[in-house]
Image: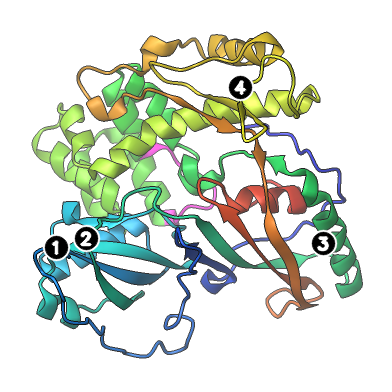
Amino acid sequence: MDLPFLIKSSPLGGQLKRRIEDFIVEEILPDGTVCKIEQLNQMPPPRIALNIPPNPNPLKLDQLHVRMEKFNLETTFAIRNLSRGTGNSVKRIGYAGLKDKRALTCQRISLWKPDIEKLKRFGMRGMALHHAEWSDTRIELGDLRGNQFTIVIRDIPFSIEETTEKIMDFSHTLTQGIPNYFGEQRFGGYRNVTHVVGKLLLQGKIEEAVMTYLTKESVGEMEDAALARKNLRETMDFKKALEAFPDTFHFERAMLNHLVFLPKDFAGAFQRLPTKTRYLFTHAYQSHIFNQIVAERVRKGLFYPMEGDILENGIPTALLPGSESKMASGIPGEIERDVLSHEKIDSAFFKNQKLGELSSWGMRKPILLRVHDFALGKVESDELFEGKTKALVTFWLEKGTYATTVLRELLKNEQN
């Protein structure tokens, strides 16, 4: 997807996430409290038992809020393992949002009437639980203020002095904001496939959607996984594919387990994915369209309020299409209609009678992203790349926005 840059700063280059601990995400709670990482940033991580206070009012306080740290784990995978280990249904565990997999993260979760003894005994590599407190409220998606980021950029091809100057110059331009593009996480990370599958599902092409998800190869993917995808695409042998896919590919294996016994039931295979994961495909396609609308406004130099805009806190918004979408008027509306026309879709496209989780009413989202408290930390020689530099940056973003979008404007390369 060609997404133009808005900030005209000099490219920094470099790489993100070379090490897991290079990308730290700490959730900011609605009251401004930061969910700080306390255990998994130590090597080896300490084994600290979860301290659960007595419940002062069991009839009213039926939710236990806990802070969850994770290292190189998907949020949904961590939740499923916590469910298995404690006997709590996945449906009874709430969280405010998904966090990056290839990162060290901390977020708040809630468990409805958990088995206290099982929870105290729970342990899993790459996870830590702390700060338990009782509440009468389940944590739902969106119950956060934002996220605090601490990020190391590596392999920068400039001296320490040049790197420092470039990042400081970039930070001075952030007051105007940057395009609020959805980041690569929304589209399946390096695979960049989720929105493609989402459109196929909305078109009713269930078999093609499932097979695309299972077989689309990607640059940088594990060799055994890429080979498993290629062989499945050529043979349609679900049993052999199940044997070939690595154990860590939980979603692919869940689908394949179903298709081994019911090889024509692609809708059933899709239903094997967790409910919240199934919703992500429509959201990804909506996000793809939003990005195209924002990109066109950047290309045309129409990034600030103008006649026809629908504003949110004084900032222009763009369309996340759905069955009840409200379109802008004037030139902003023309851009939105042109993008929908190019995609050959309309509002009815987002009504799905057979798979309700694919339906969406639609909404609007600001086209401008505000970066808060951007700061440059230590800049020094990179121990992983001889002759190169690394830099530490920190900032926080409001919910629904992406750190990789900010860093893309700084690095100005498409490798991250």
- Residue 246 appears in the figure: no
Q: Position of residue 33 (x, y in %)?
A: 48, 68
- Residue 236 appears in the figure: yes
Q: Earlier in the sequence, mark 2 or mark 1?
A: 1
Mark 2 and mark 1 residues within 8 Å of each other at the beta carbon = yes
Category of crowding for the residue at label 2, using alpha-carbon neighbours closer than 10 angstroms: few (below 14), some (14–19), many (at least 20): some
What is the spatial separation of the Cα atoms under label 4 and label 1, in whole angstroms? 42 Å
- Please identify, in this view, whether the residue under mark 2 or under mark 3 is nearer the observer: 2
Up/down of 36 relative to 221, above or below: below
The residue under label 3 is: 167
Up/down of 141 relative to 109, above or below: above
**Magenta residues, as a range?**
215-223
Look at 49% across and 16% down and name the residue there: 326
Q: Earlier in the sequence, mark 2 or mark 3?
A: 2
Q: Name the disc covering residue 60, or none.
A: 1
Q: Name the disc covering residue 136, or none.
A: 2
Mark 3 and mark 4 residues within 8 Å of each other at the beta carbon = no
What is the spatial separation of the Cα atoms under label 3 and label 4, in whole angstroms? 33 Å
Q: Amino acid at mark 3?
A: Ile
Q: Nearer the viewer, residue 346 or 130?
A: 130
Category of crowding for the residue at label 4, using alpha-carbon neighbours closer than 10 angstroms: few (below 14), some (14–19), many (at least 20): many
Residue 217 shown in magenta: yes
Q: Quadrant of residue 328?
A: top right
Horizontal relation, residue 203 to residue 175: left or right: left
The residue under label 4 is: 310
Horizontal relation, residue 74 to residue 339: left or right: left
Q: Amino acid at mark 4?
A: Ile
In the rendered view of the protein, which quadrant contains the N terminus? top right
Category of crowding for the residue at label 3, using alpha-carbon neighbours closer than 10 angstroms: few (below 14), some (14–19), many (at least 20): many
Q: Earlier in the sequence, mark 2 or mark 4?
A: 2
